[in-house]
Amino acid sequence: MTLLSKERGANPNDPNKKDPLDFILWQKVKEGEPSWQSPWGEGRPGWHIECSAMINTYLGDRIDIHGGGRDLIYPHHESEIAQSESFTGRKPFVGYWLHIGMVLYEGEKMAKSLGNLIIVSDLAKKYSANTIRWLLLSHHYRKPWEYDLLRLKSVRKKLS
């Protein structure tokens, strides 16, 4: 689990952790990021606690459906479950989880951090909404799939 956690952005060697698998509840201030004063110093909520807090504030202490990429199951969604169920005392935190397969581009996971995103609003300048929908719905939502411009062009041809 430590290797998977590290692969997904955690730092198991962080000297502030009691256990390598602990997740961050409060992130120390970083240059250029929003921050607030707290009893723990200037900073912001950790990623997992941000999501738990938003859900609890805007949707309540239990939600019916929660989704995200398969890569968010651990550690992100499991951390949300631990925090939210501990805070509210209500189980289960989520009725149904829907995790999607990764979208790949040129053999790599499509991700902002990798700089290889294909933005839908950019596609919409050249392709109809139905063409984009067809492409997105042409595979099972839980299976990884490769974005391919030739496939998008093929869909457009089918719909014209």
Image (spheres, rainbow, N blue to C red):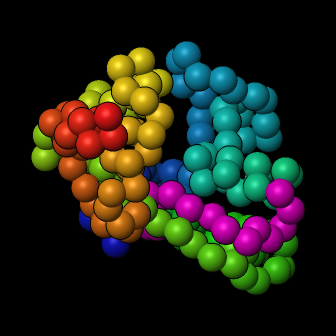
Residue 100, given in percent of the width and then of the height, sits at 42, 62
Residue at 43 percent of width and 30 percent of height: 128
Seen in the picture, residue 39 relative to 140 is either above or below; the reply is above
Does any portion of residue 71 appear in the rendered image?
A: no
Q: What count of labels does the image hold?
A: 0
Does any portion of residue 95 appear in the rendered image?
A: yes
> Does residue 113 appear to the left or right of 146 in the view shown?
right
Is residue 60 in the magenta section? yes
Residue 110, given in percent of the width and then of the height, sits at 29, 41
> Does residue 32 appear to the left or right of 91 in the view shown?
left
Quarter of the image containing the C terminus?
A: top left
Is residue 25 in the magenta section? no
| First to last magenta residue range | 59-74
Seen in the picture, residue 122 relative to 105 is either above or below; the reply is above
> Does residue 151 appear to the left or right of 8 in the view shown?
left
Residue at 67 percent of width and 51 percent of height: 51
Q: Which residue extends farthest front?
A: 160
Residue 19, given in percent of the width and then of the height, sits at 46, 67
Seen in the picture, residue 32 relative to 153 is either above or below; the reply is above
